Amino acid sequence: MSDITISRVDPRDSDVNELLQRHWEFTAEVTPPEHIHALDLDGLLDPSVALFALREDGRLLGVGAVKTLGAGHVEIKSMHTAVSARGEGVGRKLLAHLLGVARSNGAVRASLETGIQEAFQPAISLYADAGFTFCGPFADYAANSNSVFMTLRLD
């Protein structure tokens, strides 16, 4: 039986930073530069952001973050699963954890932005399966042809 843990992490931790590098590279490969909204290292270090890692038997398999937007609203950010662990439920487990963190901190709504390209379709399906529905831009986002926006009531 494997030991799965999800814990808050520092994006500067070597294995976490390495997986985040894969996330940034993946995003840059499929998204025009002006429409990349992935948090960089400084963004992940912002006090409004909590970054979490899922590990199985100590091996890092995925990361995801919750960013507090204010007034009971959070944003799901930086969701990424290691290529070797895709299709194993890592994203689903991380998302459930992030939503639990949001609820425990009093959030009543979670929103997210992700790409519309084919490479992002598994993520869109994951969010839809979790109950997220499509919505318009939120926070500082503007509508564009490379992004979709989704939201979920938590109360």
Image (cartoon, rainbow, N blue to C red):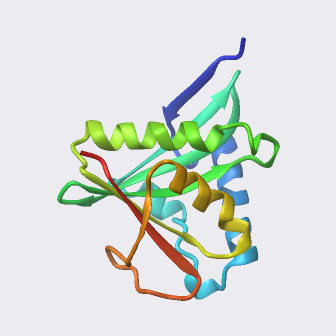
Q: Determine if residue 24 is in view.
A: no
Who's the residue at 56% across and 83% down the image?
35
Who's the residue at 58% across and 48% down the image?
12
Q: Nearer the viewer, residue 13 or 115?
A: 115
Who's the residue at 25% across and 41% down the image?
105
Which of the 4 image quarters holds residue 118?
A: bottom right
Task: Reply above or below: 43 against 89.
Answer: below
Where in the figure is residue 149, as x and y percent of width and height? 45, 71
Where in the figure is residue 27, as x and y percent of width and height? 67, 70
Who's the residue at 71% across and 16% down the image?
2
Task: Reply above or below: 155 against 113.
Answer: above
Where in the figure is residue 142, as x and y percent of width and height? 41, 86
Where in the figure is residue 57, as x and y percent of width and height? 71, 21
Q: Is residue 122 left or right of residue 92?
A: right
In the picture, the quarter occupied by the N terminus is: top right
Q: Determine if residue 43 is in view.
A: yes
- Numbered marks: total: 0
Q: Nearer the viewer, residue 12 or 149?
A: 149
Q: Is residue 86 left or right of residue 152?
A: right
Q: Is residue 39 left or right of residue 153?
A: right
In the picture, the quarter occupied by the C terminus is: top left
> Which residue is outermost to the top?
1
> Which residue is outermost to the left?
71
